[in-house]
Image: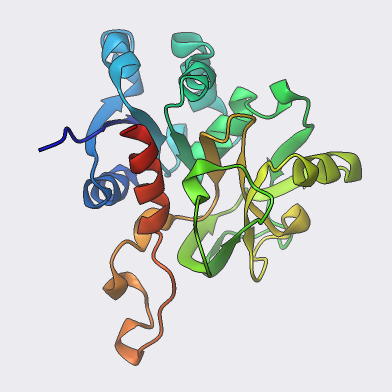
Amino acid sequence: MSRRPEAAVLTAPGTNRDPDACLALELAGANPVVIPVASLLDVRSRLSDSDMIVIPGGFSYADALGAGRLFATELDHVLGDHLSVAAADRRPVIGICNGFQTLVRLGIWTREGYRLALGHNVDGVFTCEWVNLVPDPMTRCIWTDGLEGEVACPVAHGEGRVVCDDATASALMETGRVALRYVRNPNGSRGDMAGLTDATGFILGLMPHPENHVVSRQHPGFRRGIGGGLGLRIFENGVRHAGR
């Protein structure tokens, strides 16, 4: 039997979606290993040996000083540019919700010259609802490779709106950095952007939670015959590329 790819799941105080991410990874064929950020210095070699890296959602450090800021500061201190190096080595990296906020704070996209941020939702309130996502046809992201139709999953955030100027929005679209878009925009995100990828296509940051729709019965309309595409497909893509 072939070896299951090992997925390092990085957590901080306040992370709360790691069990959901681990279930999604297991169903997709990976072996998740939860690594608290406080122990990264002791297990850096283990992280280097991991086949993929996941930063799940939650409220790391209670969103003090801004969502994802302190988690990003700690990861930057401990890991430096390890995540970008991992992607360059063709190891998939995904940041979900607070994980996406952390990736943005780490400068994954600003280092590539894209001036963007994740701001407060346009209506100023915490948004918790189900949304549908579609892959952008120009994306180079391996996590959305071969996705057809819509993916249904929930969002739960107060700071998830992609904010950028016209030039940056155009550049993101023209270079295939927009991985996923909202069918119906829940937060005012520029260009309906729900997820972004990097130059390698191996990093995905997204605000929605695909790990919360990995089996059909998780959808609130399941008993009425209403559903949508499973978020599991995103994880299956990541695991497949991690195993290569």
Which residue extends farthest bottom?
224
Q: In this view, does 170 lie to the left or right of 31?
A: right
| Residue 63 seen in the figure | no
* Residue 104 place in picture, x, y as percent: 62, 32
Q: Residue drawn at (58%, 29%), measured in percent from left and top? A: 200
Asked if residue 234 lies left or right of residue 102, the reply is left
The number of callouts visible is 0
x, y (%) of residue 180? 60, 54
Colour mapping used in the image: rainbow
Residue situated in front as seen by the camera: 115 or 158: 115
Of residues 191 and 41, the one drawn nearer to the viewer in this rendering:
191
Q: Nearer the viewer, residue 243 or 129?
A: 243
Q: Residue furthest left?
A: 1
20 over 218 or under it: above or below: above
Residue at left 58%, top 59%?
A: 126
Residue 142 point in image, percent of width and height: 50, 42
Q: Which quarter of the rendering shows the C terminus?
A: top left
Closer-to-camera residue (152/137): 137
Quadrant placement of the N terminus: top left
Residue 159 point in image, percent of width and height: 62, 48
User: Can residue 53 be seen?
Assistant: yes
Residue at the spot 30% in from the left edge and 25% down from the top edge: 36
Residue at 26 percent across and 8 percent down: it is 42
